[in-house]
Amino acid sequence: MPDLLSGKAAVVTGASSGNGRAIARTFAEHGADVVVADIQEEPRLGGTPTHELIVEETSSEASFVNCDVTSNDDLRAAVKQADEYGGIDVMVNNAGVFAHNEDLFSVTESDYRKMMDINSKGAYFGSQFAAEKMQETGGGNIINLSSINGDVGTKSNVAYCASKGAVRVMTYAMADALGPDIRVNAIHPGMIQTAQIVKDYEHLEEEKRQERLDTIPLERQGRPEEIAKAALFLASDLASYVNASSLVVDGGVKNTR
């Protein structure tokens, strides 16, 4: 298969670890230069920093930008960094936080604000700043990472569901606002083997682990590389007529609940 993103420049938030790291590496393997935007360079599960790995393993260029997505200045700086590679073509709003088994009545205003600021506000302004640049250069596309919990609510993660549901509907509204030159889509991951999920999963008793797996028709957790392949599809011309859509990557959970 030819390089699907040859000549493109992408900014991926939260790209030091997990899904973001896999997306950044996959984009680079397909010809894109990548800005790794995160609050830390080191991967949360260890290993070589993403931007260094890209330079070592591919012919693409990559750089790291310290980016807290709750800071609009940081988001602007991340988008501007792509100017080194000819200007941003693809924005992936991946950075996010997850609350493990939060109780509805224990969530404070501060907890809620943090969840919304990172998961929803970060994606909103990351998209806004990227779109401003894309409109100057002839277009591009934006990919927002929501969650299956952004489509189906669960009692153990109400605030998280609220933040990811906002991302889902925001994606559709942005697609309407930014067409025809900028496509905007969302990915809804299920249980993926990221640092957050691994940490949560390891603390469960074996019976509880199996209960979770039993909700997945494919009977396993997903891999970050599988989210990355979905992002590659949406970022490439293979998805040239895919817009204002949600791509669910959860092993079948959503349709069997």
Image (cartoon, rainbow, N blue to C red):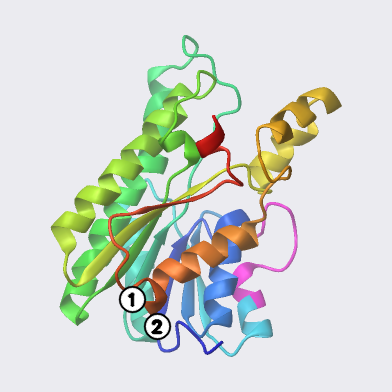
- SS under mark 2: loop
Our reading of the magenta stretch's main secondary structure is loop
Residue beneath the point at 54% across and 86% down: 60
Residue 139 image-quadrant placement: bottom left
Q: Amino acid at mark 2?
A: Lys
How many callouts does the rendering have? 2
**Quarter holding the N terminus?**
bottom right
Q: Which residue is mark 1?
A: 89
Residue 31: x and y in percent read 51, 85
Are the two marked residues, 1 and 2, in contact with CB atoms closer than 8 angstroms? yes
| Figure check: 119 above or below 25 | above
Tell which circle, 1 or 2, labels the residue nearer the N-terminal end. Answer: 2
Q: Relative to residue 120, is residue 172 drawn left or right?
A: left
- Identify which residue is drawn at 41% across, 89% down: 7
Where does residue 134 sit, x and y in percent of width and height?
23, 73
Magenta span includes 247: no
- The kind of residue tagged 1 is Asp
Residue 106, numbered label: none
Residue occupying image coordinates x 19% and y 72%:
181
Nearer-the-camera pick, 227 or 128? 227
Q: Nearer the viewer, residue 36 or 155?
A: 155
Question: For the point 47% across and 83% down, which residue is it?
Answer: 4
SS at mark 1? loop
Query: Residue beneath label 2, please?
Result: 8
Asked if 31 appears above or below 244 in the picture, the reply is below
Q: Nearer the viewer, residue 108 or 166?
A: 166
In the rendered view, would you say 126 is above or below 188?
A: below
Give the percent coordinates (x, y) of residue 47. 75, 64
- Residue 86: name its quadrant: bottom left
Q: In the image, which residues are magenta?
A: 41-53
Q: CA distance from mark 1 to mark 2?
A: 6 Å
